[in-house]
Each structure stands twice: as C-alpha cells, then as structure tokens.
Amino acid sequence: MSRRVLAAALLPLSLVLAGCAGTEVLDAAGSSSAASSTSGGATEGSTAATTPAEPAGTALTVEVAGGQLAGDTGRVPVPLGDPVTVTITSDTADEVHLHGYDVTADLPAGTPVELSFEATIPGVFELELHDARTVLLTLQVS
Amino acid sequence: MNLLAHGVGSRTDLPIPLGLALYGAGAAILISFAALLLLWRSPKLGGPGSGRPLPPAVQRFVESAATRRALQGMALVLLGVVVAAAVAGPPETRRNLAPWALYITFWVGLVPASLLLGPVWRAVNPLRLLHAGLSRLVRSAPGGGRLPALGLWPAAASLLVFLWFELVYPGRAEPATVAAFLMAYGVVHTGLALWFGPGWFAQGDGFEVYSTLIARLSPWGRRDDGRIVVRNPLANATATPETPGLAAVVVVILGSTAFDGLTRTVWWQTGPGAANDSFSGTAGLVLSIALVGGLYLLGTRLSGRLARQPLGVQPRRYAATVVPIALGYTVAHYFSLLLLDGQTTWILASNPFGIPGVDLFGTYGNVVDLTAVSPDTIAYVQVGGVIAGHVAGVTLAHERALLSERHARASDQLPLVIVMVLFTVGGLGLLFGF
C-alpha cells in the first residue's frame, strides 16, 4: 500500500520529464529565430538578396585601449555552426586565446588581428588576453 | 580563465531553457505538497539496524589492514606524482596535470565514486598511511580527549578552506597553487591527526567527511552491530548520526555550489563580481553560505517550534535530509565538467612532466571532445538531478519528522519543506542564469 503511495508522490516527476520534451521544440524554435536576427544584423543590407542556403556568419570586433574594452564585449550569443570572425585591436602586444576551441593568435600592438573559426562546439567560452588575463568577451554558442 | 569560477575548465554550460526551469520549479512545489499529504504516516524506512549483511569473507577483505594499506599506498604514490607534476611539469595550466587531477578528477570524481562504492576516501586516504607511519615515532595523541566535542566542525572549516582556493583565489588554476595547497593540506592534517589521534580524519579531513557524507546516499552502510550491509539508500541516509557540525558541513557544500553557479551568471559577471578579485569572491562565497545557512536554520527551527520540540537539536537532526539536495546541485553543476574537461586528466597523465616523446598510455595525442555530451543531455541531467535531490530530501525530512515524534502533524513540516523548495527553485534559477 505504501509503495502505491510513494508512486503517487513520484508521479508528478514523470509528468514533468514528459512535459520537458514538449518545451524542447518551443525552445529550439525560439533560439533559431533569435539566431537569424543576430546573423541578419551582422550582414545588414544583403539579407533580402542572398539565398538562405549560405550561412551569413557572425562578425565581432573588440578594441582594447589603456586596459578599457570597447565593441562586442560581455556575453555574445552565436548560432551553432556559424562561421565566426572576431577582429581584435589592442594598444599593447599580447596573445589572444579562445578557450575550448583552443584558437590562439599573436596580437601585435596597434594592428587589428582576425580570429576565424566555425562555432561547432556548443557551450559558453571565454576569449581572453593571455598575458593581461583580461576576458574580452564570452561566446555563447547554442 | 578568469570568470570560470571552479578551479579549471575551458567551457561552462549553456543556460537551461526557460521552459525546463519552470517545469522543474513547478514539479518541486507539487511534489513537496504531495509528499506532505500522501507519504506514509509512521516511520518505515528502517533505521541503523536495517540492511542485508555482506558475506563475512567480503567484509573481512574490505576491512583488513592489508587491503587498506595497499590502497592508501597507491593513493600516496598518485598524490606524489600529482605534486611532482605540479612542481616540475609544464608551467601552463592547460598542459599541467595537477590542476585537472585535483579540481576535476579527484574533487568532482569523488562524488560518483562515493555514491557507487560507499565511503571510499576513508579507505583510500593516503594521509592515514602517513599518519600510521609517523605515529610510531610520537608516543601518544595529547589532544585525543578533546576530539569528540569538536564534532564535524573541523571538517566544515577544512572544506571551506579548499572551496575558497577552488572558487575564489585568483591563482587557483596555477600548478604552483595546487602544489602548495596539496603539500600544506597533507602536512596540516597529518600533524593534527598526530595531535588528536587517528580519529581526526573522520572528523576533520574535509575530503574524507565529504566522501562519507555522499556515501550516505549509496547502498552501502554499516549496521549498528558493525556488519557492512546493502540497504535502501534512503534508509542509509536516515541512519546518519546527528553529529554536531553536520549541518555546517552540508550548508558549506550547498552554499559554495550555489556560489559557483552564481559566478557563471551574466548578472554576477557584470555586477557585484565585475572586479573579479579576491574581495568580491570572498564576500560572495561567505554571503552565499550565510544565506543558505540562515534559511536552513530558519526552516528547521520553525518546524521544531510548530512541533513543540527542543530547538537546539533541530538543525543537526535534519542535516542529512539536505544532503540529497546538495548532491543534486553538485551533479547539475559539475557533471559536464567531469565528462568533458575531465578528459584532460587522462590525456596529460600520459606525460605528467611534459617531456618530449613520452607517451605512457598512448593518449597524449588525444584531443578533448567537448561535444561528447549534447547540450540537451546536459540540461536534462541538470534539471533531473536537482529535482531528484529535492524529492529525496523532502522524503527524508518527512521520515525524520515522524521518527522524532510518532504522531507529527504534516503541517509542522511546512517551514522546512518551503526552505527546500526555495533551495531547489533557487538552484534552477542559477542554472537558468537569470
């Protein structure tokens, strides 16, 4: 008898887990619409003409001057699978490192450097100045 | 590596979808009230005397000094390798074995190991071997008489020190930090064990107490007649002795995991934690633990007041019931770390000193596969872990209330259940990332 009571108490859990499968579709739809608006913003002007088969890609820029950051800093959402180009300009020489993807590039003072990669790994990753230990931006790939 | 709070790692999890967070929170509330109304009305889980004993030969083997000394000897060798790698290996964190071995494989791996095998670190603890060797030179333990009064408070302090190094100290990922921490930990705890006697490890060594506490939710227990038994993990948890300081240990574990989740949110990274220094981290860690502790004291004492029971013993009486909630938090926050970044340990172990051409296990050329577990799986495990922990916690608290008073009214348990709902909804909020 008590076993049946326990089962009754646990029933809502199974309902919840079944219910979650329903939200997944909703969330996937939500994030893909958010993604298309992001990539649309990056390639303004050519969105109507190009075919949707070609991914637009994400272009980001960060400037470092006197220890201050400007441009696309903070948490930056990127759609999974998108080609991403980050252009970094720094007033001091350093090395940039994108964790997880393990992409690094030397950063000479005053010269813009482009970091290009395909956003194939989902998760949250930091783009960091190796010597100064400054986090330039956090990439949220989903 | 600045914003990633836990010791090391190259990635953090995506925020869980809003729908999943809301379903989880709703389920937590629904289950709690269903539990109060529907669960059994007299204690039924079985106490310290329950369980099916293992064959005597198995128990003799598990408990024999030879087995334990052999395991401790192996652990001591591994500890030596990790410390040596930290001192003499490559200076970069991502190529040095020690931070990955300590923060991920050992600290996070201790949880599944204890859950499946029981209190493993008590059997394997290499400091016990060091102490056994040194205690032949020292005649007696002068502080032994004072140890019982300390309860588990030393373990709470020991865990807090480790967690500060892991979550707050800015140089936490440096191999030199890991080397210094491990050597200091070994010296301090072996020294304290010489002073207080070998009983120190079970009360003061944070790692051992953590493993023993998680093992309370394993199927392996010790019956009150000394036999090692297999029993329902919930009965095992119910049999946890009400030791002073137990609540403090649980609160430190839960509060620090909540702080780790907090530091991954955009709110923390752009707000209170933007300075990203020791001060903001220390304040955040202390406040998180204080908030969890305050809520816990409030819930247990209010429940005790409603049931007209002495208030002083309430916090430790219910401490074991919060262990599943803390375990759910731990699974949610560190499961992906162990499976994804944890691969690094096995790659670097093939060449601990970074010598060109060395590849002991043929794994040094492997690359960490950060896509081995999909984001959907991670999100389901996170929410599932938190909710399962909540269900077990509420169930255990119900049994404890009935044990303390045969005809306890269900409504007396309401304050503690509400606090548990707050912990669970708060935990889901941290996973959602605000």
Image (spheres, helix red, strand yellow):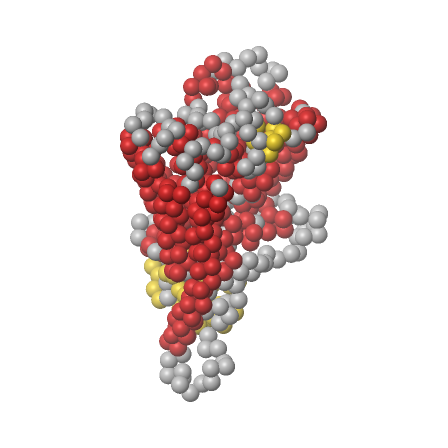
Residue drawn at (37%, 83%), measured in percent from left and top? A45
Residue B333 seen from this side? no
Q: Position of residue B221 (x, y in %)?
A: 56, 31
Residue drawn at (43%, 33%), measured in percent from left and top? B42
Is residue B386 left or right of B33 when viewed as pictured? right
Q: Position of residue B108 (x, y in %)?
A: 53, 43
Work out whether B131 lies above or below B84.
above
Q: Position of residue A135 (x, y in %)?
A: 41, 57
Instruction: Using the image as rendered, state which of residue A61 and residue B384 is in the foreground.
Output: B384
Work out whether B434 lies above or below B291.
below
Residue B289 seen from this side? yes
Q: Give the mark count.
A: 0
Residue drawn at (47%, 14%), measured in percent from left and top? B145
From the image, which quarter does the C terminus of chain B lie in?
bottom left
Q: Position of residue B153 (x, y in %)?
A: 42, 27
Is residue B30 left or right of B206 when viewed as pictured? left
Residue drawn at (46%, 29%), measured in percent from left and top? B155
Instruction: Using the image as rendered, state which of residue A11 and residue B17 is in the foreground.
Output: A11
Where on the picture, by quarter, is residue B106?
Answer: top right
Q: Residue furthest front?
A: A1
Work out whether B185 lies above or below A124.
above
